[in-house]
Amino acid sequence: MDYLTNKMCIGLKRVSLTGLLNCFCKRGPIGLWLIVLFFFCQCGEELTSGTSSETKNTLSLAKINMNTTDRGENFWGMAFNYPLLVRLDTNYDFSRCGGSGKNIEFFKNDTVTPLPFEIELWDSAASRAAIWVKLDTLKGQDSVQHIFMRCYDSEFSTSLYTKENVFSPTNGFSYVLHMDQDTVLNQPEIIRQGNMGELVSSLVGEGVAFDGEDDFLSVPDIFLQKNDPVTVSGWFQVSDVEGSYTLASLYNPELSTSLLTIMVNGNVLEIIFLGNTTLASFTGISPNTWHYLSFVLTGNGNISLYIDGDLVITTAIVQQVPGFGYILLGHSNNGKDLMKGIVDELRVSSVSRSAEWIKLNYRNQMKDSHLVTLYAGE
C-alpha cells in the first residue's frame, strides 16, 4: 500500500463497519467505495506488514511508550537511528504470544511502517525477553512518543529483522557483542580460554562469567588507526573488591602494549594509558553491582571517561595515540590479573558518541529503567 492509502486506512480504522453501512445508505456509491477500502485495509495489513508475504492474523497489539522527560529518564537532545532496548517480563502476557519470538513485528506509531529489530532473548516459559528496536528518532523531553509490537498466530521469516539492520556500520557500530550463546560459542573470531562456555543470566540477556583463574576472551580484528574516533562501552559486575585485576584492555599487537587498561584495585577503578600513565580513577566500585563503563576517544587526541552515564574526566593526550587491534576481556596482555565477575553488552563504535547518547544508553539498559513502558493493549 502506498503512503496515501496508508493514511486513509489509518483513518478508516477509527470508523466502525456499522458507521460505513449507514454512510452507504445515505451516500450510495461513496459509501460503497469506503466499505471496499475498509476491507482492503484489513486484508492489506495482514498481507503487507513487514517484509513477509505470508498471511498473518494478529493475536495481540501492544503499545510501547518512551518517556524522555524527568518523569521517565530525562533525556535532552535527539538520538537518531537509536537501538532501543525493550524488555518484556511481568509487564507482558506471554501466553498471548508465546513461541520463540519469530511471530512478532514492531511498527512506528502509524501501526503500518515496520521497524528493524533484533531478539537477543526470548524465553516465554520464564516470561523474559530482551529486544533491540531501531528507532529513526528518539526525541528528548517527550512523554508521548510510542511504537507498537504486533504478535501473530504463526511464525514467519524475513531478512529485515537481524542484528546487522539494528547495529549497522553505517550508524557507527563496528562491533556489538551481546555476550549471549551466539556471540561466545558460535563465532570463531572470539578467542576463548578457560571456562568461557558457561553463560549466566545477566543484565540484558546472558553474560560471560570470569572465574579469576583461567577465564578470558580476546576479540581480534578491530583495527582502528592512529587517532581514529572511537567509543567503547560495556557493562561489568565484579564478584569482590579484594586485590587487583584487569577488566579489559585495548591492545596493540604491533607495539605489544595496550592503549588503555581498565583495572580494579579494591573498590577503585583505574584507567591506565600505554601501560604506565594513570588517566583517571573512580572510587565506588561495589561487588555484585552493575556498572556501565564508556570511554570516548576523539580524533584530536582527547579521551573522556564515563561511569554509569556520568562524565568522570576528559583529558588531552600529548602523545600520538596508537590504534588497537584487540579487545582483551578479563585480562591484560601479560595474561595476569584475571578478573572475577561478569561482562555484558560490549560495543565498539567508529564515532565519538555524545555525552547524551552515553547517558541514554545507561538509562535505557539499566535494570530499573523508566524510559520504556509497555501497555498490553488489545
Image: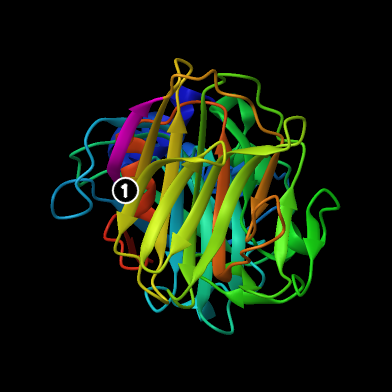
**Where is 191 relative to 227, above or below?**
below
Q: Residue at x 53, y 69 (%)?
A: 129
The answer to whether residue 203 is visible is: no
Describe residue 186's horizontal placement relative to residue 249 as left or right. Answer: right
Horizontal and vertical percent position of residue 364? 36, 53
Looking at this view, name the residue that lies furthest to the left.
70
Q: Residue 335: x, y in percent? A: 72, 59
Residue at left 72%, top 76%? 198
194 sits to left or right of 7: right
Nearer the observer, 96 or 228 = 228
Q: Nearer the viewer, residue 360 or 198?
A: 198
Q: Which residues are magenta?
A: 310-316
Q: Residue furthest right?
A: 188
**SS of the residue at dot 1?**
loop
Q: Main secondary structure of the magenta part?
A: strand
Pick the quarter of the image with the C terminus.
bottom left
Of residues 194 and 366, which is closer to you in this image? 194
Task: Determine if the magenta segment contains residue 41.
Answer: no
Query: In the rendered picture of this protein, how many numbered marks are placed on residues?
Result: 1
Q: Name the image quarter holding the N terminus.
A: top right
* Residue 64 visible in the shown view: yes
Task: Determine which residue is flagged by label 1.
Answer: 309
Query: What's the amino acid at mark 1?
Result: Gly
- Asked if 122 appears above or below 70 in the picture, the reply is below
Q: Quadrant of residue 35?
A: top left
> Is residue 198 toward the left or the right of residue 151 in the image?
right
Q: Nearer the viewer, residue 99 or 297?
A: 297
Residue farthest to the bottom, as pictured: 125
Which residue is found at the position 70% from the left and 50% from the top? 333
For the view shown, which residue lies furthest in the front direction?
276
